[in-house]
Image: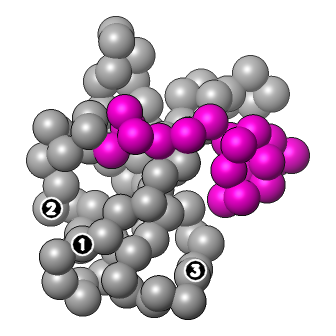
Amino acid sequence: MARRTIGIDGNIWKVYPAGRLTVYGKDEFSLVFELGTGPERKRRFTRYSPRSSQSTDAALAELTERQLQDLFRQSQPAWTSPEGAYGAL
């Protein structure tokens, strides 16, 4: 699984595909933004629709820093997201 990092407000967030598949297949996939580890970690989720039917790893690798920042800004906290089991993880 591909992983990236991104700097947001002085913090380094890890970014990777959430692994949750939808009925849309390669049309869209979920991205996880994760800060920290253990019970104190923060997680945010968003959906991304690549322009082609490439793999999720390839699509993530091609995103620019600016695109990742934009996706982060439209992401939602884990407690509001089905991908994050509404914060149960």
Q: Residues within 10 Å of mark 3 (few under 14, many from 20)?
A: few
Query: Which mark, residue 50?
Result: 1
Task: Residue at 67%, 27% (x, y): give it.
Answer: 41
Residue beneath disc 3: 21
Tell me which residue sits at (63%, 29%) in the image: 42
Asked if 18 appears above or below 42 in the picture, the reply is below
> Which mark, residue 70?
none
Q: Residues within 10 Å of mark 1 (few under 14, many from 20)?
A: some
Q: Vertical placement of 70 versus 21: above or below?
A: above
Q: Nearer the viewer, residue 70 or 39?
A: 70
Q: CA distance from mark 3 to mark 1?
A: 15 Å
Marked residue nearer the N-terminal end (2 or 1) = 1
The N terminus - image quarter:
bottom left
Q: What residue did someone put label 2 on?
A: 62
Q: Secondary structure at mark 2?
A: helix
Q: Is residue 36 left or right of residue 81?
A: left
Q: Residue 27 at what x, y percent from top left?
A: 35, 83
Instruction: Please provide percent x and percent y for residue 64.
Output: 13, 47
Give how far across and how far down residue 8 sits, in percent.
33, 21
Real-space CA distance between mark 2 and mark 3, rounded to the nearest whole angstrom: 20 Å
- The amino acid pointed to by label 3 is Leu
Relative to residue 70, is residue 17 drawn left or right? right
Q: Earlier in the sequence, mark 3 or mark 1?
A: 3
Question: Which amino acid is tagged 2?
Answer: Glu
Counting other residues with Cα less than 10 Å from the Cα at mark 2, is it few (<14), some (14-19), or many (20 or more)? few
Examine the image and state in which quarter residue 40 appears: top right
76 is within the stretch colored magenta: yes
Examine the structure image and report whether residue 54 is included in the region drawn in magenta: no
**Gap between marks 2 and 1 measured at Cα:** 9 Å
The residue at the point 44 percent across, 71 percent down is 29
